[in-house]
Amino acid sequence: MPVEQTEFQSDFSQLSSADEVADYTFLHKLPKIELHLHLEGSLEPELMFQLAARNQIDLPYASVEAVRAAYEFTNLQTFLDIYYQCAAVLQTEQDFYDLTWAYLAKCHEQNVMHVEPFFDPQTHTQRGIDIGIVVRGIDRALKDARDQFGMTSRLILCFLRHLSEKEATSCLAQMEPYLSYIHAVGLDSSELGHPPSKFERVFEIARSKGLLTVAHAGEEGPPMYIEEALELLKVSRIDHGVRCIESPVLMQTLVEKKIPLTVCPLSNIKLKVFETLTEHTILTLLDAGVCVTVNSDDPAFFGGYMEENLFALADELAMTRQQAVRLTCNAIEASFIGEHRRSQLLAALRQCLVDSAN
Ligand code: ADE
Ligand code: ZN
């Protein structure tokens, strides 16, 4: 359960100056938590080519440069079309391990201490890959990161909302032997035309199995989708949620109920949710008391991991050190970790602030 915001937010605020724009060194050292990351979206073109060669798959691109050049999107759907195509190189347990490990190694370089990644099993089972292959490969990498980096994690299974609820229910049934590997279920893919209400029953089944719930809502979809996710799917967090700003009533609910939003600034620019980063509302939401957090979504496609997202906020929105610390506190509060690990992350944050003040 999220702890009382006031308990430590004010304490940490005293350790960071209110109006100093956060510099890259400070942001690099900041202990980070990532709560919105699609493992398939962390597939860098270099690894995609390696896996394609290993699995004898022809790619529709001549080179890594050609792949990167193709990453120009006009909305969520134009991205998803390429994203699902790229995921076809993932075939074996080792492929899923390598994908996950590459992401976790990058996190370690950037001082990310805790992650709650998503994976989309239906993208793979639809191609005839057994769900066990997917989940075992991912889990092995998460365990290795725990052993080698001390990095903790909570894995989240996402249902593809452009498919039917029946298919989501079948996906959950296939996961039955592996339920201990995941902590929550989520909802991603094409948002418009696929409201949260479409998945009310499968989310109820997931909750009856002891899983927590999250959902993408209010990325391209209207504020109503955020309300449905909260009321019908009983989510603990909203992924994206930036369109809440269009509804003052909803904003008030988010503040009062301390519902976290996992916001992804660079993603929102690449997918044209905002024209430019200077128009992004993340800091407006933060200053209005919404529990917003910074995340990378699909870093291989959107030009940056946690650190690059934070750097961009400092460059384009003059994010201060204090705002960066509040965003980090929010992520610690919003995470699904236990109290012991939460205290460790808060202690790491406090130490970072003491060190940077000297
Ligand atoms: N799947 C991967 N990235 C996504 C996003 N930004 N929105 C919805 N579904 C996704
Ligand atoms: Zn996402």
Image (tube, grey):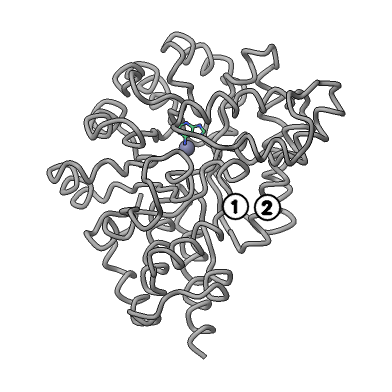
Report the number of numbered marks: 2
Q: Amino acid at mark 2?
A: Arg
Q: Residue at x 70, y 22 (%)?
A: 88
In the image, which disc is placed on residue 140? Answer: none
Q: Residue at x 45, y 31 (%)?
A: 76
Residue assigned mark 2? 146
Of 142 and 45, the residue lying toward us:
45
User: How far is mark 2 from mark 1, CA to CA?
Assistant: 6 Å
In the image, which disc is placed on residue 152? Answer: 1
Q: What percent of the width, then of the height, locates residue 342?
A: 47, 60
Q: Secondary structure at mark 1?
A: strand
Q: What percent of the width, then of the height, locates residue 14?
A: 34, 82
Q: Is residue 203 above or below residue 212?
A: above
Q: Residue at x 59, y 29 (%)?
A: 83
Q: Residues within 10 Å of mark 2 (few under 14, many from 20)?
A: some
Q: Amino acid at mark 1?
A: Thr
Q: What percent of the width, then of the height, locates residue 71?
A: 60, 37
Left/right of residue 295 with respect to residue 213 in the rendered view: right
Q: Residue at x 69, y 11 (%)?
A: 128
Q: Is residue 254 above or below residue 56?
A: below
Q: Secondary structure at mark 2?
A: helix
Q: Is residue 162 above or below residue 119?
A: above
Who comes first in sequence, dot 2 or dot 1?
2
Left/right of residue 272 with respect to residue 72 in the rendered view: left
Of 199 and 280, the residue lying toward us:
280
Of 279 and 2, the residue lying toward us:
279
Q: Quadrant of residue 180?
A: top right
Left/right of residue 258 with respect to residue 181 in the rendered view: left
Of 279 and 229, the residue lying toward us:
279
Q: What percent of the width, then of the height, locates residue 160?
A: 48, 21
The answer to whether the residue labelled 2 contacts the one labelled 1, judged by CB atoms less than 8 Å apart, is yes
Q: Is residue 142 above or below residue 307?
A: above
